Image (tube, helix red, strand yellow):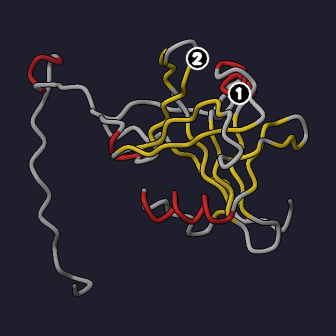
Amino acid sequence: MAENDEIQLPQRIPVSNLAQLNLRPVASKHFSKESDSHADLTVVRTEKFGNRITMSKVLYEKIGCPANIGIEMFDSGIVVRASHNSNDFRVRKSEGKPVIYCAALVRELTEMFQLDFAGRTSLSFYGASYLPNGDATVAVIHLKTDEIGNGQSAAEGEEETDEA
């Protein structure tokens, strides 16, 4: 566009009250990570410090603080449950948080749910649901952010650093 070209802007219509504007709410919802808000599940993928999944203490307690975790997938997320099967994932503690160290599991979830780690080392997920399953409780966590609805993202990422 040349320096002397004029830009045609739409004409402004004088407004005397809000009813004239035909207002409608935005579809997006506010989502903020408050200091007392903890992610239900975080998937960590780093070259230097390994791959792991951390769970919130609340999630871990609600499913019964098991020594082993079973993870099952559905179209838009996973179900996390207590397991007495030694073939499932052993829970360890890191800085008091329950952690599953398993590069293959991180890789599988990343591929299945197309998790985007571009420019970040972790993705955190919020809004777990808890359902009864016999005598136990299972956690349901949506990992596909476009499945949450209204443009709200369930995932929040951490930028890449060299810290563990």
Q: Say which quarter of the image contains residue 94.
A: top right
Q: Vertical placement of 89 versus 117: above or below?
A: above
Could you tell me which quadrant the C terminus lies in?
bottom right
Specify the farthest residue to the bottom: 2
Q: Nearer the viewer, mark 2 or mark 1?
A: 2
Residue pointed to by mark 2: 136
Which residue position holds label 1? Answer: 60
48 versus 124 height, above or below: below
Foreground residue among 20 and 8: 20
Q: Residue at x 67, y 63 (%)?
A: 45
Find residue 75 and name its label.
none
Query: Is residue 150 toward the left or the right of residue 47 in the image?
Result: left
Closer to the camera, 123 or 134?
Answer: 134
The quarter of the rendered structure image containing the N terminus is bottom left
Packing grade of label 1 (10 A; few <14, some 14-19, many >=20) is many
Q: In the visual, does 117 lie left or right of 91?
A: left
How far apart are labels 2 and 1 at the CA level? 12 Å
Q: Secondary structure at mark 2?
A: strand
Q: Is residue 138 left or right of residue 101?
A: left
**Amino acid type of the residue tagged 2 in the rendering:** Ala
Report x, y in % for residue 22. 10, 25
Q: Secondary structure at mark 1?
A: helix
Kind of residue at disc 1: Tyr
